[in-house]
Amino acid sequence: MNKKLIAFFSASGKTASIAKKLADAAGADLYEIKPETPYTAADLDWQNKQSRSSIEMSDQSFRPPVADKNADISEYETIYLGFPIWWYVAPTIINTFLESYDFSGKKIILFATSGSSGFGDTLKKLEPSAPNANIIEGKVNPSESDINTLAKM
């Protein structure tokens, strides 16, 4: 049996909402990727070059610490990985998550939320963090029918 996990980071709640719908559709477990220090609205102000998210995203090697590194990834074959798109890529906390576990032989299906962009360079930026996984671009801002399609992957 292909056990599935929906792992997600949500800054505003939009990605969390989609993750919950996808978990229901796929019959998957949910795991929220939480930063050690939660983001505030000021931290997420992408128009402010001194905001926390702007500083983190200006250095793609930066790895924000996660609050919990105890997800039991080993019991899942398929992991859906959700996040908001920041600066045309996944937030670097997603790299932190991927680098915290062994995803060898796992299928990772990406889904994302975005105000205006697609995946951009996301796949290229995430692959080095899970080198032995099969990472697949899923959907950005998935509709209800997209969620059902993703759930069958």
Image: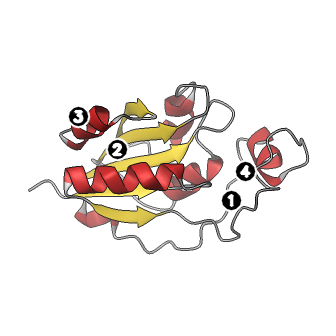
SS of the residue under disc 2: strand
Q: Circle 4 sits on which residue?
A: 62
Residue 107 percent across, percent down from the top left = 29, 44
Task: Tell me which numbered mark, 1 or 2, is placed earlier along the sequence.
Answer: 1
Estimate the spatial distance between the alpha carbons at disc 2 and disc 3, rounded to whole Å.
15 Å
Label 2 amino acid?
A: Ile
Give the foreground label among 2 and 3.
3
The mark found on residue 126 in the picture is none
Label 1 amino acid?
A: Pro
Q: Circle 1 sits on which residue?
A: 64
Residue 149 percent across, percent down from the top left = 23, 34
Task: Tell me which numbered mark, 4 or 3, is placed earlier along the sequence.
Answer: 4
SS of the residue under disc 3: helix
The mark found on residue 149 in the picture is 3
**Residue positioned 41% across, 39% down in the render:** 110
Mark 2 near mark 3, Cβ–Cβ under 8 Å? Answer: no
Image check: 113 left or right of 52?
left
Give the foreground label among 1 and 3.
3
Give the foreground label among 4 and 3.
3
Mark 1 near mark 4, Cβ–Cβ under 8 Å? Answer: yes
**Residue positioned 24% across, 59% down in the render:** 28
Mark 2 near mark 4, Cβ–Cβ under 8 Å? Answer: no
Task: Tell me which numbered mark, 2 or 4, is placed earlier along the sequence.
Answer: 4
Q: Which quarter of the rendering shows the C terminus?
A: top left
SS of the residue under disc 1: loop
